[in-house]
Image (cartoon, rainbow, N blue to C red):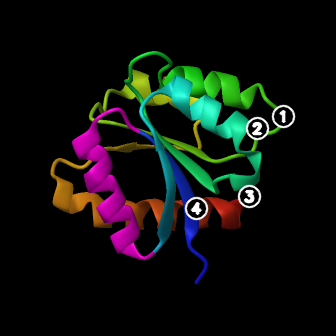
Amino acid sequence: MKKIKILIAENDEDEQTFMKDGFEGSGYFEVIGFAESGDQLLTLLNENEACRPDVILSDLNMPGKTGYDILTELRADDRFYDLPIVITSTSSVKSVIETCMRLGATSFIQKPDTFVEYASFAKALAVKLQEQKTEG
C-alpha cells in the first residue's frame, strides 16, 4: 500500500511529536514535514513544489496565518486548488466547522483528547480521504 504523504501545520512541539508517532505508526502516512505556523507552511509549499504532499493537515489556531488563512490562500492558487486540506482543532463549534468547509476545507476533524488516540485519528483520516477520493 502506498503511504499518503502528509504535511502538517501545528505550532505545539509536543503535539507535533504525538502526531508524527500516531501518523507514522498507523502505517497509512508518511509525515514529510512540519510547519510551526501558517506562514511557514505556505513558504514550504512555495519553495518545495517537487516535494508536494498528498494532503495537508492544519491546526486552525496558530500564530501568524491561521487555518482560515491557509484555506483562503491555497484555494486561490491554481497550483494547490485541488490539494486536500484537512483542518483540525480542539473546537467542535458548528460555526467554526462551517466556516472551514465554506473556505474550501476537504474535511474538519476534531483533535483527539489524548496523544495515544493519534493512531486511530490517523486511520480515520486515511479512511475519510479514501472515501472522498472514491466519491470525487
Is the residue 125 above or below the residue 70 in the image? below
Circle 4 packing at 10 Å, graded few (<14), some (14-19), many (20+), is: some
Camera sees residue 134: yes
In the rendered structure, does residue 25 fall within the stretch colored magenta?
yes
Q: Earlier in the sequence, mark 3 or mark 4?
A: 4
Say which residue label 3 marks.
136
Q: Residue 61 at x, y = what percent?
A: 37, 24
Q: Earlier in the sequence, mark 3 or mark 1?
A: 1
Label 1 secondary element: loop
Badge 3 amino acid: Gly
Pair 3/4: label in front? 4
Residue displayed at 69% across by 30% down? 74
- Tell me, for residue 5, which label it has, or none: 4
Q: Going by the image, does 68 lie left or right of 97? A: right
Say which residue label 2 marks.
81
State if disc 2 and disc 1 touch (CB < 8 Å): yes
Pair 3/2: label in front? 2
Label 2 secondary element: loop
Label 3 secondary element: loop
Q: Earlier in the sequence, mark 4 or mark 1?
A: 4
Question: Which residues make up the magenta segment?
Answer: 10-27
How far is disc 3 from disc 2 in space, using C-alphas?
14 Å
- Tell me, for residue 61, which label it has, or none: none
Say which residue label 1 marks.
78
How far is disc 3 from disc 4 in space, using C-alphas?
19 Å
Pair 4/1: label in front? 4
Which residue appears farthest toward the right when viewing the image?
78
Image quarter (top left, top right, bottom left or bottom right) of the N terminus: bottom right
Badge 4 amino acid: Lys
Is the residue 24 above or below the residue 58 in the image? below
Image quarter (top left, top right, bottom left or bottom right) of the C terminus: bottom right
Q: Residue 123 at x, y = what percent?
A: 40, 68
